[in-house]
């Protein structure tokens, strides 16, 4: 069962990777995006990009990623000096 989950996970990664490369995003950037963002978020944005069929899919995808990051950013308390 655990091997099946790993296999499905890697299949999802390969799908995301091929879709992003098809959009015109470089291989190095694709690896960084997969490392930094959850697969579910990337899959949703890929699906939305394919649905809209923009003229420049890479730009559309990256703008959507930026907006989703701003929308779902965790709230942090301000950093204070420990001495004061």
Image (cartoon, rainbow, N blue to C red):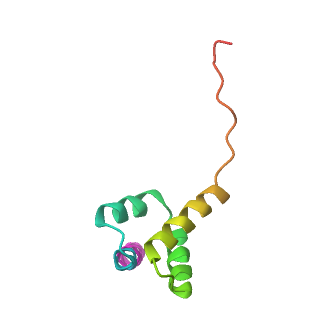
Residue visible at 53% across and 71% down in the picture: 40
Residue visible at 49% across and 66% down in the picture: 62
Residue visible at 44% across and 72% down in the picture: 58
Check the image and report above or below for 84 versus 80: above
The residue nearer to you, when weighing 8 against 71, is: 71
Give the prevailing secondary structure in the magenta stretch: helix
Residue 21 visible, this orientation = yes
**Residue 3 percent location from the top left of the image:** 36, 74
The extreme left residue here reads: 27
Check the image and report above or below for 46 versus 69: below
Number of numbered discs: 0
The residue nearer to you, when weighing 75 against 26, is: 26
Left or right position of 40 against 58: right
Q: Which residues are magenta?
A: 1-17
**Residue 4 percent location from the top left of the image:** 39, 78
Res 25 → quadrant: bottom left
Determine if the magenta segment contains residue 12.
yes
Quadrant containing the N terminus is bottom left
Residue visible at 39% across and 77% down in the picture: 23
Res 21 → quadrant: bottom left
The extreme front residue here reads: 55
Check the image and report above or below for 66 versus 60: above
The residue nearer to you, when weighing 14 against 10, is: 14
The residue nearer to you, when weighing 49 against 31, is: 49
Check the image and report above or below for 84 versus 27: above
Residue 72 visible, this orientation = no
**Residue 42 percent location from the top left of the image:** 50, 70
Determine if the magenta segment contains residue 8.
yes
Res 48 → quadrant: bottom right
Quadrant containing the C terminus is top right
The extreme top residue here reads: 83
């Amino acid at each position: 069962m655990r091997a099946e989950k790993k296999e499905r996970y890697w299949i999802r990664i390969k799908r995301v990777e091929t879709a992003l490369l098809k959009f015109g995003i470089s291989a190095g950037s694709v690896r960084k995006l997969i490392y930094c963002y959850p697969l579910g978020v990337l899959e949703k944005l890929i699906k939305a990009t394919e649905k809209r069929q923009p003229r420049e899919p890479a730009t559309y995808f990256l703008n959507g990623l930026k907006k989703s990051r701003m929308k779902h950013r965790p709230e942090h308390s301000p950093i204070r000096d420990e001495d004061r």
